[in-house]
Image: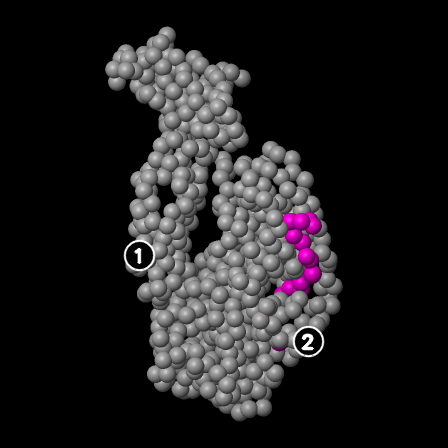
């Protein structure tokens, strides 16, 4: 075995010096549960229940025939928190709480929280039991004054909730999982590429296809929504929309009927604070094989709607999202037209059945129609065949925007008869022009006060990107630094930021609010994240660079004559050993480093031959190799 080791060691010496390889060492981007491969951890398991899926699907068929949105999941009351469920362990300098939630037969699981108030330094991850899909980390930046929070859906019928705090923090209860969402409708996940074509009809056309080439901006304004109404959750579609102040307020437009369940219940303000909005949920290829990574935001407040009591209006629902849209979302704020003109052509962009984003095309002039008792509230249309299919709409498309031939929103989908089995069926879109002023006199019943806050009287408005957005960018002098050494970070942010919030995981200082944070010192081995949040008067942007800084053992002086030192930093959780080999691969020195006493070892080289040596430092989850020269000169002479 030793001969084999020497052969391997010499091979790496020749080909890969210097060599540095870490496993999944650091938290902050990677759940601690992914690092516990060799540690036996008992995780408490809970199962809130299992619904009668056949009964749900029967109810859904009745409700969807009546024009209700497509339900995709049902909630179970839970009430789990760190005081009454789960189990705690200590690992890697953190206290970690785990809870496994099992919903046999679920396609995916979503979580709804109350009393959500994470402290600084805390991290929350949710991941599938097979560790193929994880989301997080969520932190105190996700706190909302209401204490409400919700997560996007995680794949599978078994998920693990992982909450961790620094080791010496008092692990008080900081959230309650109030409801667990059982998703029973098919949906696509980034880790389940083969199922992308199973959630909507085969006639639908992905937005990445050439049908979307003239609509790339508008496509970036459309989002998928998980709508919560009581214990039921539904798929709907919405779109970001511009206003005459060009202040990029995060207004999002969808359909009023999306907020109503089959029983007639209307989403409460608390429900809306837990809606989840998926941006960029698209296929990367026209043939539906590669799903892009979605970005999500949680929570909104209702600003106005056509009417919560009846559906005789134009069926609109205007939201203001809790958060400004981060620059990394590359979001577009769509324009609009309130003239009511009958466009000769255009597209609908939507998420049918909660699927990835699709585009449907019409090439014949719109006609006038209605959905309820009031006349001329809706446009009616037929869809046209295109090169890659014959886009229609489905459940989940509700609330999606209809664009005219100039790329402006003119309507929102209420419903219709079209589908992949009825390509010629009519669809009905509530008119933007009717929603402007005609649903009622109160500001909460019309769009005009919100989308024309300056009272300019514009009849149309172009869409735009937020050109005033601040962008977080930074660069370090080097990405690899020896333990106990320092480096500098340079702010490269754009958009004239006025404030900065740095976090240097593993560094000293760990936090800074200066544009130039000065030197940051690293005293522990590992790979560490660096994050920066910048703000200006128009918003904020954050950049997290995971595993950006690699801290390696320090070997000095080099070249060496009488001795050299190995420094690994004081970290008792990382017991390290040293192995030195000469150029032939022969081991000339082996020892342990006492991490509890500073992680320092001085090695005598007086009787070694001059030449090249390899110093290898091994830890529980890393290995580092560096060159050492044994010199003819004394250390003091160098």
Q: Is residue 506 magenta?
A: no
Does 281 sit above or below residue 433? Answer: above
- Coordinates of residue 416 in the picture (x, y in percent): 57, 80
Q: Residues within 10 Å of mark 2 (few under 14, many from 20)?
A: few
Residue picked out by circle 2: 263
Most common SS among magenta residues: strand
Does 534 sit above or below residue 25? Answer: below
Residue picked out by circle 1: 494
Does 397 sit above or below residue 313? Answer: above
- The residue at 50%/76% (across/down) is 303
- Coordinates of residue 259 in the picture (x, y in percent): 58, 74
- Coordinates of residue 543 in the picture (x, y in percent): 40, 52
Q: Residues within 10 Å of mark 1 (few under 14, many from 20)?
A: few
Q: Give the range drawn in magenta.
A: 68-85
Taking the image as shown, residue 9 lies to the left or right of residue 308, namely left
Total numbered circles: 2
- Coordinates of residue 561 in the picture (x, y in percent): 32, 13
Q: Which of 594 and 448 is in front in this view?
A: 594
Q: What element carries label 1?
A: loop
**Nearer the camera: disc 1 or disc 2:** 1
């Amino acid at each position: 075995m030793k001969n084999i080791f020497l052969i391997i060691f010499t091979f790496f010496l020749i080909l890969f010096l210097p060599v540095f390889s870490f496993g999944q060492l650091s938290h902050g981007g990677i759940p601690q549960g992914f690092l516990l491969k060799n540690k036996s951890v008992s995780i408490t398991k809970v199962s809130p229940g299992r619904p009668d899926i056949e009964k749900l699907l029967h109810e859904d068929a009745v409700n969807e025939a009546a024009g209700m949105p497509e339900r995709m999941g049902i909630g179970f009351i839970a009430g789990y928190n760190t005081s009454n469920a789960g189990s705690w362990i200590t690992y890697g300098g953190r206290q970690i709480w785990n809870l496994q939630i099992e919903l046999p037969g679920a396609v995916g699981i979503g979580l709804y929280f109350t009393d959500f108030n994470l402290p600084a330094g805390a991290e929350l991850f949710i991941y599938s039991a097979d560790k193929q899909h994880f989301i997080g980390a969520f932190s105190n930046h996700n706190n909302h004054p209401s204490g409400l929070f919700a997560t996007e859906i995680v794949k599978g019928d078994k998920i693990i909730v992982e909450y961790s705090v620094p080791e010496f923090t008092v692990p008080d209860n900081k959230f309650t999982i109030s409801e667990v969402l059982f998703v029973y409708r098919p949906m696509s996940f980034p880790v389940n590429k083969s199922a992308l074509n199973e959630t909507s009809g085969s006639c639908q056309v992905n937005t990445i296809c050439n049908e979307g080439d003239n609509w790339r901006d508008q496509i970036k304004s459309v989002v998928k929504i998980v709508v919560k109404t009581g214990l039921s959750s539904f798929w709907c579609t919405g779109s970001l929309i511009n206003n005459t102040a060009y202040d990029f307020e995060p207004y999002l437009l969808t359909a009023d009927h999306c907020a109503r369940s089959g029983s007639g219940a209307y989403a409460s303000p608390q429900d809306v604070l837990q809606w989840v909005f998926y941006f960029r949920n698209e296929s990367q290829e026209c043939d539906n094989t590669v799903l892009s990574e979605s970005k999500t935001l949680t929570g909104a407040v209702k600003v106005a709607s056509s009417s919560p009591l009846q559906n005789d209006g134009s069926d609109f629902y205007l939201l203001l999202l809790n958060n400004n849209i981060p620059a990394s979302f590359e979001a577009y704020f769509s324009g609009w037209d309130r003239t009511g003109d009958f466009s000769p052509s255009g597209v609908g962009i939507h998420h049918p059945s909660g699927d990835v984003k699709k585009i449907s095309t019409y090439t014949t002039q719109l006609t006038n129609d209605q959905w309820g008792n009031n006349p001329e509230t809706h446009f009616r249309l037929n869809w046209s065949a295109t090169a890659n299919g014959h886009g229609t709409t489905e459940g989940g498309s509700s609330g999606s925007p209809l664009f005219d031939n100039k790329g402006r929103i003119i309507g929102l989908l209420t419903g219709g008869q079209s589908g992949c089995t009825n390509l010629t069926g009519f669809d009905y879109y509530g008119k933007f022009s009717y929603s402007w002023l005609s649903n009622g006199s109160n500001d909460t019943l019309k769009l005009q006060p919100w989308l024309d806050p300056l009272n300019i009287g514009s009849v149309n408005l172009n869409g735009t990107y937020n050109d005033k957005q601040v962008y977080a960018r930074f660069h370090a002098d080097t990405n690899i630094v020896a333990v106990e050494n320092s480096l500098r970070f340079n702010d490269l942010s754009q958009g004239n930021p006025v404030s900065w919030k740095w976090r240097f995981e593993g560094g000293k200082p760990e936090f800074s609010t200066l544009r130039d944070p000065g030197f940051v010192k690293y005293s522990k081995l590992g790979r560490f994240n660096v994050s920066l949040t910048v703000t200006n008067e128009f918003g904020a942007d954050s950049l997290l660079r995971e595993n950006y800084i690699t801290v390696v053992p320090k070997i000095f002086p080099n070249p060496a004559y009488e001795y050299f030192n190995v420094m690994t930093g004081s970290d008792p959780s990382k017991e390290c050993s040293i192995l030195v080999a000469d150029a032939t691969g022969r081991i000339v020195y082996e020892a342990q480093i006492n991490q509890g006493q500073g992680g320092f070892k001085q090695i005598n080289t007086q009787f070694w031959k001059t030449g090249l040596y390899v110093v290898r430092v091994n830890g529980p989850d890393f290995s580092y190799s560096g060159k050492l020269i044994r010199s003819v000169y004394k250390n003091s002479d160098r």
